[in-house]
Amino acid sequence: MKKITFLLFIFTISTQLMVAQNLKRANHLFEKRAYLNAAELFLNEEPKTQEVLEKLADCYYFNTKMDQAAPWYKILIQNYEANVEATYLFRYSQALKGIKNFSEADKWFKKYNDKKQLVVAKNLETLPFFERLNAEIKNQYTVQKLSVNSKFSDFGPAYFGDKLVFASARNGGKLYVWNNQPYLDLYQANVNNTDLTNVVPFSETINTKVHESSAVFTKDGKTMYFTRNNVEGQKKRSDKNKVTHLKIYKAQFVNNGWTNITELPFNGDHYSVEHPALSPDEKQLYFASDMPGTIGSFDIFVVDINADGTYGSPKNLGSKINTDQREQFPFVSSENILYFASDGHFGMGGLDIFNSKISNETFSLPTNLSDVINSNLDDFAFVVDEENGRGYFSSNRNGGMGDDDIYRFIQEKTYYVQGFVKNKNSSELLPGTLVTLFDDKNNAINEMIVGDDAAYSFEIEKNKNYKIRGSKKLFNPSEIEFSTNEKGNVNKDILLLLESYDDAEREIVTDKDKTQIKINSIYFDFDKSNIRPDAAIELKNVVAIMKKYPAMVVEIGAHADYRGSDDYNLILSEKRAKSVREYLVSQGVSNDNIKSVGYGETMPINECIKEKICTEEGYSLNRRCEFVILD
């Protein structure tokens, strides 16, 4: 009996030691980022504590195996929601998007924001967000699969003259513990109209036994920047957790070969610097890093490339671009638009691709490229040749050849007429102007009221005739006709100059917030409404101005003197206004442009408001007609 008890004791102690060693080994692999191997050990852990559940779910999450990550995050949060950090609510939301459970993902994204006390747009829901985005988006894309993708990871395309360079794990070499795929090398391929061909390894002096990826080349093809593991000679250099970080290296093309390979001075042994991208003038280098000073796990930075080949200090692009999550894979187009991947800005799931216009070192609010480009998994490494509207990006979406795949897209060109509205005489901007676009049949096909910047923009088509009109109250409308053709004479910049009526005509004056056609006074005989001969002569001036400006709308305001009852004078003034309107119409002025109003005795212009205090001439001054311009 004692022997059996002793054996049971030994077995229990041995089991506890094995469990402890299993957990220690799992944690060690997790710290080394050998996530898939670590997951196998965490699966065997019982009981599954909060820490074990967090790490087990993370192992799958970091390999974008969302169908396996989501159930473990669910168990974690069901058991420990009050204690888990907000990060796990975010990852659970992303994992749910990865399996297209968007409604549940939106719920946990809101809980994440509440826990982080982040202020976000109300009712931010994934599917309605993209429905609105697609209704607003101007540039449409057609996405195509490439046949050259392998069953391994292929990503990070870069233009290299008439070729494309990308990273791939297809080499069959030593496995990388993060995802159990071979280490990455750079490859190059020829580009044709529909696919990539003739894929071959890039230079042997660039590719090594460790990772090489994410290259960018100067326009002359003589300098490249690329990402590589932190190495010294042929040996990887690791931090205290046995993690080998990434660095950006520079190489030069000399005597038909890549040489002078040097690492950039702002690299570090305890953080990663990766994904280089050049500005159009090649005077700045953009990159992603988790160096000290980041807002999230990875941020995008920029550094000046000095004329002597040295570098300035890296600058974080700030909170408009960077979030408390990941921003990576920058690319700057020839039109100075920054494209980058992020899972911190609201998106479809995983990394989404966004763009932001760069102007005077400031950035516009990032815009999601829509769910035509982005999927519910990772989409990243976007590059575009804006001249021909073609480009590439990478994605591990469902339906690909392997892990990460490279996709080609065609950007359907969109053309615009755009410009500003200004005062013809003062050159001041005219906010509030209605700008209307007409087709060749004079049908209004689009319109907008310009804002404070007085700028307008409309989409137009090739081989069409158009007219653009600017209209503003108390201004003469401005109209310009233009045409587009097949060969690039499409985009139009048109300045609309509007002249105010009181600037254009000396008979039109503005006084006390009224703009009027000022002519010699139109008077009526006492108790009469007919047009007198002297009045007809003056009205010819009104007719001339209104015919000159056929869009002008005028109110005829007729007035009576004080004598007579209020009701009688009101009716009399209405008859006088109607009489003037009929006269103007008889002379060819459009009835639609005239409004007649009788004001009776309510608006005298002198003190003749009582019986027997004025002369007949004084009373007659109030028997007048005014022509106030309404539009």
Image (tube, grey):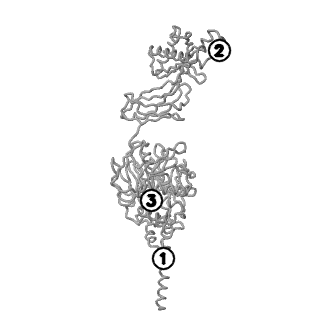
Q: Amino acid at mark 3?
A: Ala
Q: Is residue 63 visible?
A: yes
In the rendering, at what x and y percent does residue 158 appear? 42, 51
Q: Relative to residue 4, is residue 142 depicted above or below?
A: above
Which residue was labeled with disc 2? 610
Which residue was labeled with disc 3? 95
Q: CA distance from mark 3 to mark 1?
A: 29 Å
Closest to the observer, 443 or 576: 576
In the rendering, at what x and y percent does residue 160 appear? 41, 50
Which circle marks residue 19 in the picture?
1
Q: Are marks 2 and 1 in contact (CB under 8 Å)?
A: no
CA neighbours of label 1 inside 10 A, class few (<14), some (14 to 19), many (20+):
some
Q: CA distance from mark 3 to mark 2?
A: 85 Å
Q: Secondary structure at mark 3?
A: helix
Q: Earlier in the sequence, mark 2 or mark 1?
A: 1
In the rendering, at what x and y percent does residue 186 appear? 41, 57
Q: Amino acid at mark 2?
A: Lys
Q: CA distance from mark 2 to mark 1?
A: 110 Å
